[in-house]
Image (cartoon, helix red, strand yellow):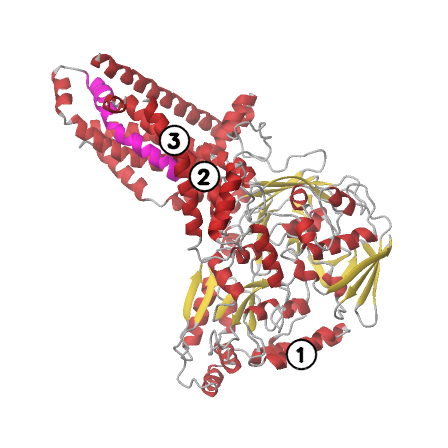
């Protein structure tokens, strides 16, 4: 009996092992055969004339494609191709001219004298991919839904008091404040026009309680309802997004490329490998060192894009949180102590563009004249005037978060600032944190000095500057309400908001930039360029500063 | 044996309730505000609008309720089979899990099969040739393998085998040109077999080969050290000496007498390794763009997405319990003493 009991498991064990061996050997053999036998996947298959391209990126944050809710990443490259705005930016050599808007869905537009009422006339030929005509009511509905859903990006339309469509070809916006640049506001990636009939059929509503009753998000994430040259074909979260061209696009010939596939390659070095092998056509994005590696590869070009995205430094303006940074003289002293040229050269071999004032120069921000630059003696003098003749050794949390996608890194910037400030006797406590615990404290305004990145909602110096000025998103985080220098800055901000001419705006903007050096809590530092390797056989690759490529302009050479 | 299995199965709901409860309690200790994580640095930034937006989000996702009340609601829904909606992906957690669990499960199963094979072969060979060149080579290789950082190996390995040599497939589970087989189990290899799609099977195995071999070898090398150690101990025991004295062939002694006893710790280790691999593959998944549970768990955890995290915890709990049950049954199969005790 005992013997039988011992033998049975022995046989079972052998069978078990044998099965293991066979299964694993078979797996390895098939893998080896396929590894040797199959070539790399071709990215340029030709679905029904025109071919396709593959764009590889980290798709972890690409979760929603609902224009009223998406505020992550992929919505920007997607929206500009699938949806359309009332107006767009004028094409220019190698990219776009962000000082000139051109018709898109609207053929004409006109502002009232006080720049508070804007009337757009729509193109009578415009139609959605569904075949429905684009009407004034679609525009008004899309904007009302955007406002009433109250999603994360809804602040973009906070200045719109009302939007109506008196007739199918016209849409009228009433603004709360004058804005001579309102047509530019409508180019914000989220402010697109949806096929209201189609979205309503799938749970969309523009009602006042849309924040609770609109249920179209999931549908809009796997389908599109736009009038652009492409539409969403399929979406597998975290894996793949496929766009297909609209064959009878109202705006012109069908796009040369029949299909655009976004695929998930989270690791930047794996994207470099994939583009070198020709498995992908565009790598969304790599760091400069990786771009340099590709310099000798004749099959790959690298586009250095200026997406109007920059690093900023915010100092807390609330004396209850930090009395040191709440003093405007201290803030000015720390700006004088900063080595601005050194900051622009932190990424070895890849100098970046400085931002002198409150907007990149390319958008109309001030140049060197609005930023005095480093002056250690002046810094020490200001610290002495503020009551710190021997420097400062009290609490000073200089914080940022870990992120590896840019060069210089966030951590490089804080280290550099800490070493610069040490030269005038200010000792900062550097904290490089995990993103989600950082964002929790950032939104609460619980920091002394904060380093992070920012970008304008649409290419505009006034929008860029607005975040740092009183009432702006970044200024609000610094808890700067009524204290040191606030009243003076608030005055110029109000003047800027009340200006009805663009030339007057520019003059006031430069004044605000100069005042901000002395009084402000938030200072912009340097631009963050992005590097996009792409296969050299791709023509028409031009970056749009609203984080997208217009795939309509691309074709295989 | 049946009683043993029933007893184990009865423990499952208790363990799962405990795990979900712990998840909710621990989430209170994390210094993350889910509303802040949801909105990011730019979201809802208009003056005067933020409080309203945060209030609306809190109501929608239940962030404003005390944690025990949320736990009560969660358990009530769970009993009705509803895992809730993820605040990260904004999809039902059940849908997310159906998408993200099978790829990881496929990778982990393949890696474990390779690990067990490598562990047994290297461990036995090394023990049989103790003190000789082969043994030394195995010790060096296993030491190197165990101490090398997975992230580095995955990065270098992927660049070498995919980038330079072109042997490994690119990122993901399938080439972009391969149409996936109809989803039945979610395991691409199995689904390709079911559909009789040999092209998809070959492509899926090609994509699976690199991450599975990498993980399998790394764990296999660790297993080999354990098997070697156990084998050496067993080979020095009296009954093996007696077997040698009887004149049995050394291969018979190794495979039939020694290995069966030496393999018991490996069975335990395999169970543990399987569970930890489920979430531990995140680094390899990241590098090879594998659409698995690792990245999903990371996103849910960092955004304090309680429904998402708890869904993952439930899946891992169920897999862990199942695998350990299988391990216990295997014990009985391998070691008659266990069967007699629980008979």
The residue lying toward the viewer, choosing from B315 and A89, is: B315
The vertical placement of A492 against B130, above or below, is below
> x and y percent of residue B52 in the render?
62, 61
Among the 4 quarters of the image, the one containing residue A163: bottom right
Q: Please say whether residue A256 is visible from this viewpoint.
A: yes
Q: Please say whether residue B114 is visible from this viewpoint.
A: no
The residue indicated by pointer 1 is A492
Q: Are marks 1 and 3 in contact (CB under 8 Å)?
A: no
Q: Nearer the viewer, mark 2 or mark 1?
A: 2
Q: Which mark is residue B10?
A: 3
The residue indicated by pointer 2 is B314
Residue at (28%, 21%) from the top-left corner? B343
Q: Nearer the viewer, mark 2 or mark 3?
A: 3
- Determine crowd level at label 2: few under 14, some 14-19, many 20+ residues with C-alpha closer than 10 A: some
Query: Residue A508 colored magenta?
Result: no
Highlighted magenta segment, given as a residue range: B249-278
Left/right placement of residue A236 relative to residue A331 reads right
């Amino acid at each position: 009996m005992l013997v039988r009991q011992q033998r049975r498991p022995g046989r079972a064990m052998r069978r078990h092992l044998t099965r293991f061996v066979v299964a694993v050997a078979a797996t390895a053999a098939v893998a080896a055969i396929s590894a040797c036998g199959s070539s790399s996947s071709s990215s340029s298959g030709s679905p029904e004339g025109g071919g396709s391209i593959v764009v590889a990126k980290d798709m972890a944050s690409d979760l929603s494609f609902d224009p009223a809710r998406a505020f992550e990443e992929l919505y920007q490259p997607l929206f500009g191709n699938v949806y359309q705005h009332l107006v767009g930016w004028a094409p220019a050599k190698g990219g776009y001219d962000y000082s000139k808007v051109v018709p898109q869905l609207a053929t004409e537009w006109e502002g009232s004298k006080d720049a508070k009422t804007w009337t757009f006339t729509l193109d009578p030929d415009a139609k959605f991919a569904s075949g429905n005509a684009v009407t004034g009511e679609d525009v008004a509905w899309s904007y009302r839904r955007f406002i009433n859903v109250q999603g994360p990006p809804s602040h973009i339309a906070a200045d719109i008091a009302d939007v109506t469509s008196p007739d199918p070809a016209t849409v009228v916006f009433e603004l709360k404040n004058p804005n001579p640049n309102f047509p530019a506001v409508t180019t914000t990636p989220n402010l697109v026009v949806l096929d209201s009939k189609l979205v309503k059929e799938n749970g969309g509503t523009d009602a006042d309680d849309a924040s609770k009753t609109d249920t179209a998000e999931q549908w809009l994430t796997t389908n599109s309802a736009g009038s652009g040259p492409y539409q969403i074909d399929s979406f597998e979260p975290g894996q793949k997004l496929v766009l297909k061209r609209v064959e009878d696009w109202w705006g012109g010939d069908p796009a040369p490329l029949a299909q655009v596939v976004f695929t998930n390659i989270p690791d930047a070095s794996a994207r470099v490998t994939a583009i070198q092998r020709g498995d992908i056509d565009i790598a969304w994005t790599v760091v400069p060192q990786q771009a340099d590696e590709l310099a000798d590869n004749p099959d790959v070009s690298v586009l250095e894009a200026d997406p109007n995205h920059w690093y900023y430094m915010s100092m807390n303006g609330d004396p209850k949180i930090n009395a040191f940074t709440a003093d405007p003289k201290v803030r000015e002293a720390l700006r004088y102590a900063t080595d601005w040229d050194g900051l622009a050269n932190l990424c070895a071999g890849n100098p970046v563009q400085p931002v002198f004032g409150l907007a990149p120069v390319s958008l109309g921000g001030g140049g060197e004249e609005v930023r005095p630059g480093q002056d250690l003696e002046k810094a020490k003098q200001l610290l002495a005037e503020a009551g710190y003749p021997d420097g400062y050794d009290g609490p000073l949390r200089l914080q940022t978060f870990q992120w590896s996608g840019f060069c210089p890194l966030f951590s490089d910037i804080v280290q550099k600032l800490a070493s610069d400030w040490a030269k005038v006797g200010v000792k900062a406590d550097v904290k490089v944190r995990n993103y989600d615990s950082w964002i929790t404290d950032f939104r609460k305004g619980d920091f002394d000095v904060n380093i992070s990145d920012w970008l304008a909602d649409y290419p505009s110096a006034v929008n860029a500057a607005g975040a740092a000025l009183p009432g702006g998103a970044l200024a609000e985080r610094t808890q700067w309400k009524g204290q040191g220098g606030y009243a003076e800055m608030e005055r110029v901000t109000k003047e800027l908001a009340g200006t009805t001419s663009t030339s007057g705006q520019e003059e006031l903007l430069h004044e605000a930039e100069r005042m901000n050096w002395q009084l402000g809590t938030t200072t912009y530092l340097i631009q963050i360029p992005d590097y996009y390797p792409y296969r050299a056989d791709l023509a028409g690759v031009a970056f749009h500063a609203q984080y997208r490529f217009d795939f309509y302009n691309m074709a295989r050479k | 044996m049946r009683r043993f299995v029933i007893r184990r199965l009865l423990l499952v709901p208790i363990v799962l309730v405990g795990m979900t409860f712990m998840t909710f309690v621990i989430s209170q200790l994390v210094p993350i505000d889910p509303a802040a994580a949801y909105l990011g640095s730019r979201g809802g930034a208009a003056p005067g609008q933020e409080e309203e937006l945060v209030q609306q989000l809190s109501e929608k996702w239940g962030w404003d309720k005390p944690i025990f009340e949320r736990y009560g609601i969660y358990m009530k829904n769970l009993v009705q089979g509803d895992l809730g909606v993820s605040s990260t992906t904004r999809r039902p957690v059940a849908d997310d899990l159906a998408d993200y669990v099978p790829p990881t499960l496929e990778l982990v199963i393949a890696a474990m099969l390779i690990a067990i094979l490598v562990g047994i072969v290297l461990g036995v060979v090394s023990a049989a040739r103790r003190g000789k060149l082969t043994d030394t080579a195995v010790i060096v290789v296993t030491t190197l393998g165990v101490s090398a950082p997975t992230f580095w190996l995955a990065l270098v390995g992927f660049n070498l085998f995919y980038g330079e040599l072109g042997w490994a497939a690119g990122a993901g589970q399938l080439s972009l040109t391969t149409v996936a087989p109809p989803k039945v189990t979610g395991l691409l290899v199995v689904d390709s077999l079911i559909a009789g799609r040999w092209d998809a099977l070959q492509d899926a195995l090609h994509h699976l080969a690199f991450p599975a071999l990498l993980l399998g070898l790394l764990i296999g090398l660790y297993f080999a050290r354990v098997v070697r150690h156990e084998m050496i101990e067993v080979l020095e025991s009296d009954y093996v000496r007696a077997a040698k004295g009887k004149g049995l062939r050394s291969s018979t002694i190794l495979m039939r007498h020694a290995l069966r006893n030496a393999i018991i710790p490996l069975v335990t280790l395999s169970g543990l390794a399987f569970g930890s691999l489920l979430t531990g593959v995140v680094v390899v998944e990241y590098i090879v763009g594998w659409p698995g549970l690792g990245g999903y768990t990371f996103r849910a955890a960092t955004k304090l997405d309680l429904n998402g995290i708890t869904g993952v915890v439930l899946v891992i709990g169920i897999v862990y319990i199942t695998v350990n049950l299988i391990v216990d049954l295997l014990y009985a199969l391998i070691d008659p003493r266990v069967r007699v005790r629980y008979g």
